[in-house]
């Protein structure tokens, strides 16, 4: 009897190890050379840092909590985002929908692509890269990191690509910068989530979205021992226990996009990065707007500091602008600018 129990335990152990090895090989082993610590900021990145700080202060400091229970600030945030896109020289569009008698707005700004080979008689429609972040905050929180950082990053990236357009260097692919409403509970992973409404309409129009990048809670880093946790104890075997990196996350179907993005990020990176393409049922994997695009068959990833698995002020009244590491936040955004530039040429 004892021998039988031992053999059973051995088989279970072998099976678990085999699953973990396969998970690492297919979902966690990422291309590119990682860096071990953050590098100093360049002069351009110092300017970017202050730009990011100002926009987070505007959203989480001046406007504050913004959601359907604080509807006026939610609309003030939408107006600020729309005005920021417009001031960058971009044409904006409100993708609106009604919810319980109140109008909700996704805010979009687009830089049209210039796909080669198109003619007046045979127009071609360039593939679309969506860069997005939700601008609402959870009930009871001013939402500096979650997700003022994602919105500030989206605005900063939009400004930089708008400058390229003004220099008559349009992108090959169409770039869409979108601020989504109603990501937070009770709309989270529901039909009322702003990004799901948006992704569904994209699918109905036949939009050819080749990549969606969700910028979700990207401004907190720590060098303290054991400052990083994971949704599953097994994941801690493969990843650092110090929260000094930026994370790239996708479902299994978006694995190719994830690997391409992290390889491009690491090519230019000045901050450590980790990646994972995992089943969507694992806690955290689907926890943002990339989930909405998965529902309609689009490849999508999330860029994140891992939120509740690192950030001690997650979904609290203490999620304020002073809690963020703006130097490392700026390095992430600077790296993502180079990723998008390179993605545009692939």
Image: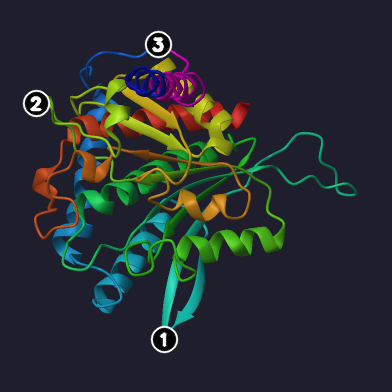
- Residue 47, percent from left and from top: 24, 34
- Dividing the image into 4 quarters, which one contains the N terminus? top left
**What residue does disc 3 label?**
33
Q: Residue at x 68, y 53 (%)?
A: 207
**Of all residues shown, which one is farthest toward the top?**
33
Nearest the camera: 333 or 308? 308
**What residue does disc 2 label?**
224
| Distance from Cα at disc 2 to Cα at disc 3 | 23 Å
Point out the frontmost of discs 2 and 3: 2
Residue 278 belongs to the span the image colors magenta: no
Question: Where are the magenta residues, as a range?
Answer: 11-33
Q: Secondary structure at mark 3?
A: loop
Q: Residues within 10 Å of mark 3 (few under 14, many from 20)?
A: some
- Residue 245, percent from left and from top: 26, 26
Image color mode: rainbow
Nearest the camera: 147 or 5? 5
Q: Residue at x 70, y 62 (%)?
A: 205
**Of all residues shown, which one is farthest toward the right?**
121
Tell me, for residue 100, which label it has, or none.
1
Query: Mostly what secondary structure, the magenta segment?
Result: helix
Q: Residues within 10 Å of mark 1 (few under 14, many from 20)?
A: few
- Residue 322, percent from left and from top: 9, 46
- Residue 327, percent from left and from top: 19, 30
- Dividing the image into 4 quarters, which one contains the C terminus? top right
Nearest the camera: 265 or 138? 138
Is 321 placed left or right of 286 in the picture?
left
Q: Residue at x 22, y 30 (%)?
A: 328
Q: Secondary structure at mark 1?
A: loop
Is 137 placed left or right of 324 in the picture?
right
């Amino acid at each position: 009897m004892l021998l039988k129990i031992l053999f059973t335990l051995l088989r279970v152990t072998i099976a678990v190890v085999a699953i973990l090895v396969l998970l690492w090989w297919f979902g966690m082993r990422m291309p590119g050379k990682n860096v071990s610590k953050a590098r100093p900021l360049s002069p351009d990145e110092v300017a970017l840092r202050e730009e990011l700080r100002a926009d987070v202060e505007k959203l989480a400091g001046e406007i504050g909590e913004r959601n359907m229970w604080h509807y006026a600030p939610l609309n003030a945030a939408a107006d600020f985002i729309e005005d920021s896109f417009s001031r960058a020289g971009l044409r904006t569009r409100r993708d609106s929908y009604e919810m319980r008698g109140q109008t909700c707005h996704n805010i979009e700004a687009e830089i049209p692509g210039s796909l080669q080979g198109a003619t007046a008689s045979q127009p071609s429609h360039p593939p679309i890269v969506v860069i997005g972040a939700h601008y609402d905050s959870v009930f009871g929180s001013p939402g500096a990191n979650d997700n003022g950082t994602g919105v500030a990053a989206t605005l900063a990236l939009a400004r930089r690509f708008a400058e390229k357009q003004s220099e008559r260097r349009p992108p090959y692919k169409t770039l869409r910068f979108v601020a989504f409403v109603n990501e937070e509970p009770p709309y989270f992973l529901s039909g009322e989530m702003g990004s799901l409404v948006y992704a569904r309409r994209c699918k109905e129009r036949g939009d050819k979205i080749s990549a969606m990048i969700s910028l979700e809670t990207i401004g907190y880093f720590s060098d303290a021992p054991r400052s990083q946790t994971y949704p599953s104890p097994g994941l801690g075997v493969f990843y650092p226990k110090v929260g000094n990196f930026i994370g790239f996350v996708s479902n299994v179907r978006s694995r190719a996009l994830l690997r391409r993005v992290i390889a491009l990020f690491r090519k230019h990176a000045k901050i450590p990065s980790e990646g994972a393409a995992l089943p969507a049922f694992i806690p955290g994997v689907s926890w943002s707007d990339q989930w909405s695009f998965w529902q309609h068959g689009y490849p999508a990833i999330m860029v994140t500091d891992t939120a509740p698995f690192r950030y001690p002020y997650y979904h609290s009244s203490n999620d304020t602008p002073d809690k963020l590491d703006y130097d490392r936040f700026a390095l992430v955004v600077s790296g993502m600018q180079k990723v998008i530039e390179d993605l545009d040429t692939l």
